[in-house]
Amino acid sequence: MKNKKIAIVTPGGDAPGMNACIRAVVRRAICSGFEVAGVMNGYQGLIDEILIKMDARTVSGIIQHGGTVLKSSRCAQIKTPAGLSKAVQTLKKNKIAHLVVIGGDGSIKAAEKISKNSIPVVCIPASIDNDVFGTDETIGFDTAIDTAVDAIDKIRDTATSFDRVFIVEVMGREHGFLAAEIGLASGAEFVLVPEIKYDINKISDELKKDQKKKKISAIIVFAEGCGDAKKVAKQIFDCTGIDVKMSNLGYIQRGGNPSARSRNLASRFGNASVDLISRGYKNRVIVLHKGEIKSLSIQKVISGKKKINIGTLKLVEKLAV
Ligand code: F6P
C-alpha cells in the first residue's frame, strides 16, 4: 500500500463535523502509509485541478470548527460528461488511487459516476439533511438539530409571551428528517414534512380547540420541502383569524461548532473509510446501522429510498396536548 495516494473532497452543502472527518481520514491514511491530497472547492476543484498536499499537521485544530477547510461549491459541471471527464482526468493525472467523498446524497450520486471510470471511491455521508439511504445518521445532522432547537427555544419565549402562533421553516431539501427530529426536541405542536400530506383545515381546527383549552401559543415546524410557508400562514389565518408569525432559520442550521456526537461520528466514519481502503474495498459508502459502523455498495445507497419515521411524527402529535 506504500505511497499510494488518497484524495479527499467535500462537495455540496457543508455540514458540521466535516472537518473532524477530514482530520480522521488524513491522520489514519498517513499512519497507514498513504499520501493524502485535499481537493479544494468540492468537485469544482477536481475539474479545475486544485489539489493540496495534506499531512497530520494540516488538520491540526480543526476538529471543533464547522464548515470545511477544503471548501465547497455547488458544481453543476460534474453532472455533464465534459465535467466528469475533466474530474477523472485530474484524478488519473495525479495518480490518485482512491477518492474519499465526504458529502450528501447528490455528492454520492456523482461519486458513483466517477467510480465507473476506474477510480475507486469510498463515500462518507455528511449532510444536515440526513437524507442518505442506508445510514441512520449523517455527519452534521445532530448539530443542525441542536442549532435549530436552540433557535426555536428562543422563538418560543416570544410565542408564549405574546400568545402567538409561529411557523418555523427549517432545511432538509425534499425531506422531513431534520424537521421531524427538531419538532420532537423543541416540543412543537405541529410538524409539516413533504413526505406526508398535511391538512390546513385539520391544523386550523386543532389550533382553535387548543385556544379553547387556553393553549394559545404554538410552534409549527415547517420543512422547506413542503413549499411556501407564507401561503400556509395565510391559509391558517383565513380559517382561524389567527395572525401566524413566520421565522425561517436558514443557513444558521448549517454552521457552527459540531456537537460531540457529530465529531465522534465523523471520526468513526473517517477511520472506517481508511480501514476499508486498506483492506482493498472500493465503491462503498460508510454507514451507521443500529449503532454499528458498516458499509454498503454505492449502488445500494443511491438506489434506496430512505423513509421518514412516522412514529416520531405521531409522538409529536401525542405530546402536543
Ligand atoms: O443539503 C443541505 C442543504 O442545506 C439543504 O438543507 C438546503 O436545501 C440546501 O442545502 C441549500 O443549498 P445551497 O447551499 O445551495 O443554498
Image (cartoon, helix red, strand yellow):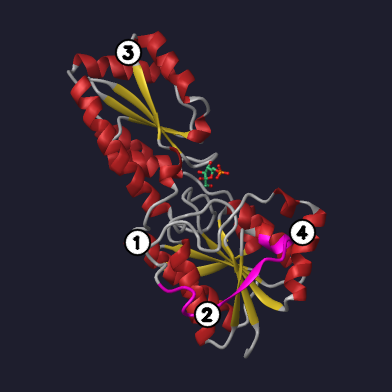
Q: Which residue is mark 1?
A: 261
State the residue at coordinates (26%, 36%).
Answer: 154
Say whether marks 4 and 3 touch (CB < 8 Å): no
Observer-side mark, 2 or 3, equals 2
Observer-side mark, 4 or 2, equals 2
Observer-side mark, 4 or 3, equals 4
Amino acid beneath label 4:
Leu
Instruction: Give SS at disc 3.
Output: loop
Q: Is mark 1 within 8 Å of ligand 1?
A: no
Does residue 291 appear in the picture of this structure?
no
Q: Which residue is mark 4?
A: 84
| Distance from the alpha carbon under mark 4 to that under mark 2 | 27 Å
Q: Which residue is mark 3?
A: 242
Say whether marks 4 and 1 touch (CB < 8 Å): no
Q: Residues within 10 Å of mark 3 (few under 14, many from 20)?
A: some
Instruction: Give SS at disc 2.
Output: loop
Q: Earlier in the sequence, mark 4 or mark 3?
A: 4
Q: Which residue is mark 2?
A: 55
| Distance from the alpha carbon under mark 1 to that under mark 3 | 39 Å
Left or right relative to 181: residue 4: right
Q: Position of residue 273 (x, y in %)?
A: 53, 73
Q: Is residue 2 above or below residue 171?
A: below
Does residue 21 appear in the picture of this structure?
yes
Q: Quadrant of the C terminus?
A: top left
Q: Residue furthest bottom?
A: 2
State the residue at coordinates (35%, 18%).
Answer: 244
